[in-house]
């Protein structure tokens, strides 16, 4: 049904209950609630999709291989483009909301995240007319990528919830995102999309900051800004602790 010219287009509004999460030694995770409203002048049904991404960080993995009767690690493969944290929540399964191409373009769902291993890629000219990107991992590339997702999921850093967005009243929705204790430090982005007929018709973006607090923040900044001094200080503290322990045990 076409929307009359005098009616406004579909729109969405959203907010977070928290925009700053402070991590201390007693941090046991946090729950962020995303809530908002859908303004839909049309009678067509609408879906809401929430995507929360943490700061990107490279993932280094290796495969166990059997050589001469012993299990050893293969040469490690570094994957890039993987967010340190990822949650996808929706009113129903993503595959029922939008086609593959739309989900891939938005990175909606762990299968559509732009995770790749650029150091393993090369460009070959085939048929003399075009360049083709080829991975050294070959047919095993999919398994390597799945391993990255599996490791993140086991650490509770990646998840999808196909019923994670609920309409609590007419036009009002709510979604909950749990941050585990292993959630990386940095800036997070929450993208909220309104879908109709398999395409996003409106969106909003909100940011969330996860940062160290107190003594943990001081040590964290010291380690990032002066890694060599931090390393020397750590060695000095370890040596001092060892010496103190030896003195105590010698007296007893």
Image: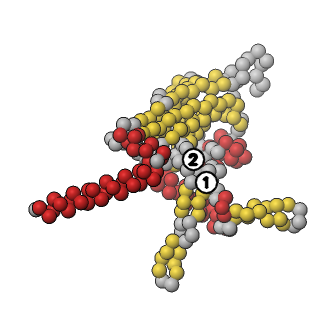
- Residue 96 on image: x %, y %: 65, 43
Q: Residue at x 51, y 84 (%)?
A: 68
Residue farthest left in this picture: 252
- In this view, the residue farthest toward the bottom is 68
Do residues under tags 1 and 2 come within 8 Å of each other at their CB atoms?
Answer: yes
Q: Callout 1: 10 Å neighbours few (<14), some, many (20+)?
A: some
Residue topped by disc 2:
56
**Is residue 201 toward the left or the right of residue 229 in the image?**
right
**Tag 2 secondary structure:** loop
Image spot of residue 80 (x, y percent): 61, 54
Q: Position of residue 97 (x, y in %)?
A: 65, 40
- Identify the residue at horizontal 41%, vertical 54% (top origin): 231
- Answer with the quarter of the image where residue 140 lies: bottom right
Quadrant housing residue 92: top right
For marks 1 and 2 on the same chain, the one whose residue lies earlier in the sequence: 2
Residue 48, visible in the rendered structure:
no
Q: Which residue is mark 1?
A: 80
Looking at the image, the residue that sits furthest to the top is 6
């Amino acid at each position: 049904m076409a929307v009359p010219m005098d009616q406004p287009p579909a729109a969405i509004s959203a907010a977070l209950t928290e925009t700053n999460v402070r991590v201390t030694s007693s941090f046991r995770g946090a729950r962020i609630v995303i809530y908002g409203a859908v303004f839909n002048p049309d009678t067509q049904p609408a879906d809401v999709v929430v995507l929360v991404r943490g700061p990107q960080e490279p993932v280094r993995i290796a495969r166990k291989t059997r050589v001469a009767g012993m299990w050893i690690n293969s040469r490690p493969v570094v994957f890039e483009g993987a967010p340190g944290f990822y949650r996808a929540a929706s009113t129903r399964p993503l595959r029922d909301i939008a086609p593959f191409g739309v989900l891939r373009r938005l990175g909606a769902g762990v299968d559509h995240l732009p995770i790749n291993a650029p150091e393993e890629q090369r460009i070959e000219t085939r048929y003399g007319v075009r360049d083709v990107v080829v991975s050294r991992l070959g047919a095993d590339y999919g398994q390597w990528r799945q391993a990255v997702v599996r490791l993140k999921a086991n650490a509770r850093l990646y998840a999808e919830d196909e019923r994670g967005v609920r309409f609590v009243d007419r036009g009002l929705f709510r979604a909950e995102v749990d941050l585990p204790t292993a959630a990386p430090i940095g800036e997070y982005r929450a993208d909220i999309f309104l879908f109709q007929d398999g395409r996003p018709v409106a969106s909003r973006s909100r940011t969330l900051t996860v940062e160290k607090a107190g003594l943990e923040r001081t040590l964290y900044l010291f380690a990032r800004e002066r890694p060599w001094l931090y390393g020397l200080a750590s060695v000095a503290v370890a040596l001092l602790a060892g010496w103190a322990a030896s003195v105590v045990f010698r007296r007893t």
